[in-house]
Image (cartoon, rainbow, N blue to C red):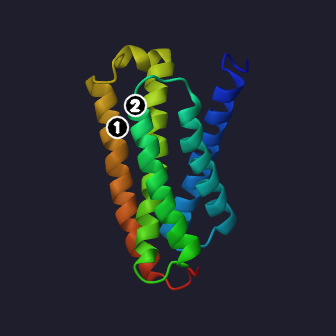
Amino acid sequence: MIFGMSTFTFVHVVLSLIGIVAGLVVMVGLLTARKFGGWTALFLASTLATCVTGFGFPFTQILPSHVVAILGLVVLAIASVARYGFKLLGAWRWLYVIAAMTALYFNVFVLVAQLFAKLPALHMLAPTQSEPPFLITQLVVLLLFLVLGAEAVVKFRIKSRFSA
């Protein structure tokens, strides 16, 4: 047990946090049209590992977390093919941005859900995660990602100094 978590849970959480931090760095790169190749690889790999390890927890039915993980795997596949297979050529450039931003959003969405589930102060505000504080927080996160994602698509496309 590490911090009251099983080793598997701890590894899953660490992978998720690495994915979020690396994803935020990649997002800055997208917004400023700078290449962060190592950060991109770390983001995609750790987020992929987070999605996959999410299925390692015992379950008897498909949960919302599984649906998010499946969707995450789909957008990670698109991002990886766009980045490494098609080298961001043509439409693959903006598809990569949308897929990468979506993968990061999914990670942050789950982080917010976990914070509301595990932190006593937040849990008291939204014990079933259907209360207004939780819903408003998730809506703000979604809107933030939509705005930043749209900006990243535009800036990533028009800045010529970013290369594959």
Q: Are marks 1 and 2 in contact (CB under 8 Å)?
A: no
**158 or 54: nearer the eye?**
54
Which residue: 46% across, 64% down? Answer: 78
Q: Residues within 10 Å of mark 2 (few under 14, many from 20)?
A: few
Say which residue label 1 marks: 138
Say which residue label 2 marks: 62
Q: What residue type is labelled 1?
A: Gln
Tell me: residue 74, above or below residue 152: above
**123 or 50: nearer the eye?**
50
Secondary structure beneath dot 2 equals: loop
The mark lying in front, picked from 1 and 2, is 2
- Where residue 144 appears, as percent x and y from the top left, is 36, 51
First reached walking from the N terminus: tag 1 or tag 2: 2
Which residue: 50% across, 20% down? Answer: 118
Q: How crowded is mark 1: few (under 14 residues within 10 Å), some or many (20 or more)?
A: some
What is the C-alpha distance between the residues marked 1 and 2?
22 Å
Task: Specify the quadrant of the image occupied by residue 84.
Answer: bottom right
